[in-house]
């Protein structure tokens, strides 16, 4: 018998590399999630400054991870909790960074930011936009697709453009809901419009989940899942479309307004490869791959095939059912979070610069209110007036950006325009 070759033991340096990479990623993510003044460099540690000792111990020991929740809903769309209650629940579950991604609205972001400030959490302003995949772009036809948008602390640039799109979608949701009720009535399953709007709440565009809850309360089905399976699913007899834009339009809008785009729950699509191919051509950045029960077979490979960042979230609504993942249930790897922030931060900084440049063109109290719609200022209570536009820039920088971002973003053009400007009433 021939002797088998013994495998050489791997060298310690090669083993240490993943640990070092995780430590660097952890330090990068933690520095953004918990902004603090950079420590004074120590001459004794200058040779090893690439790997902070505390981060190295945490990463190698498996502790100190930073929990992000990138997909959640509140009462402002089809969730059950207020933004404040959602933030509090996320905090109890150990979430450090939360993205509120209500359907087709960002109305809950200011409340979420205010609540998060009390807990030392960060909010990533987000929205889940309803769209349609139609290869021939024929209105009223195609497959429904949801696309997540993630913005920096200051929110979207050109917000009016985005808000106009979202408003049009929400208006279409009212018509869509009425069409669904008409179809249900034809099926001898009558539901009153007042019942649905009461469940949705004042000012909230009704969606399928609200109709599903009405079906449960009326006794036609036992639970929401049955309502979708029997009536409201994409192929259900009561399904109807609204005024959703095409997926390409949505992705381009997100890009134009300074956001990161990600395909939500691709496992719900009939032909995910075709949809993802179209989205990638339009500029899609990422897609959901991870769920609380792990990766879904095939979607990690699709993300790799099209060069998309792999993300995930709980899609928490607060329904209180046993089959719903709790907020913070999807624990993304620290290297995934680092890759996400490395992609997003330059885009968010550029959006912030655009917002401040627009303010510099007309530095008024009214326009100040617009730029503070999402970006809460940490040391400003609204009572003391700003002496000049430069004060606005400085306070925005310290409130919205980490120290690394402040060093990276170039705002000399903004500062020069605002140097001698007073804020007009």
Image: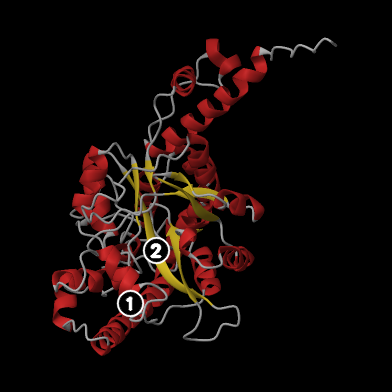
Say above or below: 105 vs 375.
below
- Is 387 positioned to the left or the right of 162 in the image? left
Which quadrant, please, contains the N terminus?
top right
Asked if the residues shown at circle 2 and circle 1 are in contact, with their CB atoms under 8 angstroms apart, the answer is no
Q: Earlier in the sequence, mark 2 or mark 1?
A: 2
What is the quadrant of the C terminus in the image? bottom left
Residue 382: percent from left, percent from top: 21, 55
Residue on which the image places disc 2: 128
Q: Is residue 13 above or below residue 403?
A: above
Q: How many marks?
A: 2
Query: Whole-percent x and y of residue 24?
Result: 53, 28
* Relative image position of residue 261 (x, y in whole percent): 50, 59
Name the residue located 42 percent from the left edge and 33 percent from the top edge: 30
Quadrant of residue 73 within the rendered picture: bottom left
Q: Which mark is residue 24?
A: none
Between 156 and 314, the one lying in front of the other is 314
Element marked by disc 2? strand
In this rendered view, identify the residue nearer to me: 220 or 215. Answer: 220
| Residue in front for this viewpoint, 330 or 45 | 330
Q: Is residue 66 left or right of residue 412?
A: left
Local packing at callout 2 (Cα closer than 10 Å; few below 14, some 14-19, many 20+) is many
Secondary structure at numbered mark 1: helix
Is residue 83 visible to us here?
yes
Q: Is residue 417 visible?
A: no
Corner quadrant of residue 167: bottom left
Q: Is residue 50 left or right of residue 239?
A: right
Q: Which residue is mark 1?
A: 170
Between the residue at mark 2 and the residue at mark 1, the CA separation in whole angstroms equals: 12 Å
Query: Which residue is pictured at 48% across the width and 35% down the height?
Result: 334
Picture residue at 54% right of the left edge, 42% below the top? 339
């Amino acid at each position: 018998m021939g002797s088998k070759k013994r495998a050489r033991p791997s060298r310690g340096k090669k083993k240490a590399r993943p640990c070092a990479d995780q430590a660097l990623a952890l330090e990068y993510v933690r520095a953004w999630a918990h902004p603090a003044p950079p420590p004074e460099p120590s001459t004794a540690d200058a040779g090893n400054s690439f790997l902070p000792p505390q981060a190295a111990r945490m990463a190698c020991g498996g502790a100190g991870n930073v929990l992000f929740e990138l997909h959640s809903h509140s009462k402002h769309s089809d969730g059950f909790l207020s933004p404040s209650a959602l933030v509090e629940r996320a905090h109890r579950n150990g979430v450090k960074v939360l993205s509120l991604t209500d359907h087709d609205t960002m109305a809950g972001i200011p409340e979420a930011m205010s609540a998060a400030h009390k807990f030392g959490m960060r909010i990533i302003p987000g929205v889940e936009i309803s769209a349609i995949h139609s290869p021939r772009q024929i209105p009223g036809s195609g497959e429904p697709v949801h696309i997540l948008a993630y913005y920096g602390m200051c929110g979207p640039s050109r917000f009016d453009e985005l808000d106009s799109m979202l408003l049009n979608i929400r208006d279409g949701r009212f018509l869509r809901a009425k069409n669904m009720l008409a179809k249900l009535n034809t099926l001898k399953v009558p539901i009153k419009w007042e019942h649905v709007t009461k469940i949705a709440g004042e000012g909230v565009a009704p969606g399928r989940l609200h109709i599903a809850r009405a079906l449960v309360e009326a006794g036609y089905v036992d639970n929401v899942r049955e309502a979708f399976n029997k009536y409201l699913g994409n192929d259900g007899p009561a399904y109807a479309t609204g005024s959703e834009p095409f997926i390409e339009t949505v992705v381009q809008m997100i890009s134009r307004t300074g956001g990161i785009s990600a395909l939500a729950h691709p496992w719900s699509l009939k032909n995910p490869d075709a949809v993802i191919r179209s989205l990638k051509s339009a500029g899609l950045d990422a897609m959901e791959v991870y769920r609380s029960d792990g990766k879904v077979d095939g979607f990690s490979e699709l993300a790799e095939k099209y060069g998309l960042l792999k993300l995930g979230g709980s899609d928490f609504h607060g329904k209180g059912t046993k089959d719903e993942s709790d907020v913070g249930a999807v624990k993304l790897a620290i290297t995934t979070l680092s890759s996400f922030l490395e992609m997003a931060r330059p885009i968010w900084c550029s959006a912030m610069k655009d917002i401040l440049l627009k303010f510099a063109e007309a530095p008024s109290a009214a326009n100040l209110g617009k730029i503070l719609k999402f970006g809460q200022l940490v040391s400003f209570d609204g009572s003391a007036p700003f002496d000049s536009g430069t004060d606005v820039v400085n306070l925005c920088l310290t409130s919205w950006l980490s120290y690394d971002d402040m060093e990276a973003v170039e705002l000399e053009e903004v500062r020069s325009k605002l140097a001698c400007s007073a804020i007009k009433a």
